[in-house]
Image: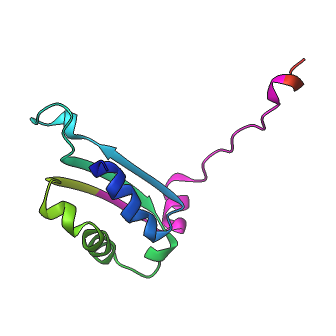
Amino acid sequence: MSVQLTIETKLASLDPSHMEVVNESNNHSVPPGSESHFKVVLVSSKFEGMRLIQRHRVVHELLAEELEGSVHALALHLYTDSDWTKRFGNAPKSPPCLGGSKVG
């Protein structure tokens, strides 16, 4: 399993309403195909009532094995649902699919 998929799988336990795990290794002086530098944007109601440092600790505990091993850098952007909405608003909804047979 790739490091990115492992990170995504472990962070799924936080029941995120939004999650992005971006491999940023290609922006650093590492061999091609490396998985050592990641950015995580995670929105979860489980962060309610937690200070930012507490949120970071939760994620670091979940990813302790990866941080002790192959992950050299981890940029964390952690939000509650209400923090996310206040800061970025709601994501626009996709238009309804008309399906190939319904297009005239």
Q: In this rendering, would 32 be left or right of 101?
A: left
Residue at the image position 13 percent from the left and 53 percent from the top: 72
Where is residue 80 shown, x and y percent of the image? Answer: 48, 68
Instruction: Name the one closer to the observer, 75 or 3.
Output: 3
Q: Can you say whether 104 is above or below 99 in the image?
A: above
Q: Which residues are magenta?
A: 76-100
Residue at the image position 21 percent from the left and 69 percent from the top: 64
- Is residue 67 at least partly visible in the picture? yes
Q: Residue furthest front?
A: 1
Q: Quadrant of residue 56?
A: bottom left
The coloring applied to the image is: rainbow
Q: Can you say whether 61 is above or below 79 in the image?
A: below
Q: Based on the picture, tell me whether residue 80 belongs to the magenta stretch.
A: yes
Where is residue 13 shown, x and y percent of the image? Answer: 44, 70
Where is residue 37 shown, x and y percent of the image? Answer: 20, 47
Instruction: Name the one closer to the observer, 54 or 83.
Output: 54
Residue at the image position 55 percent from the left and 59 percent from the top: 85
Where is residue 34 shown, x and y percent of the image? Answer: 18, 39
Q: Based on the picture, tell me whether residue 67 belongs to the magenta stretch.
A: no
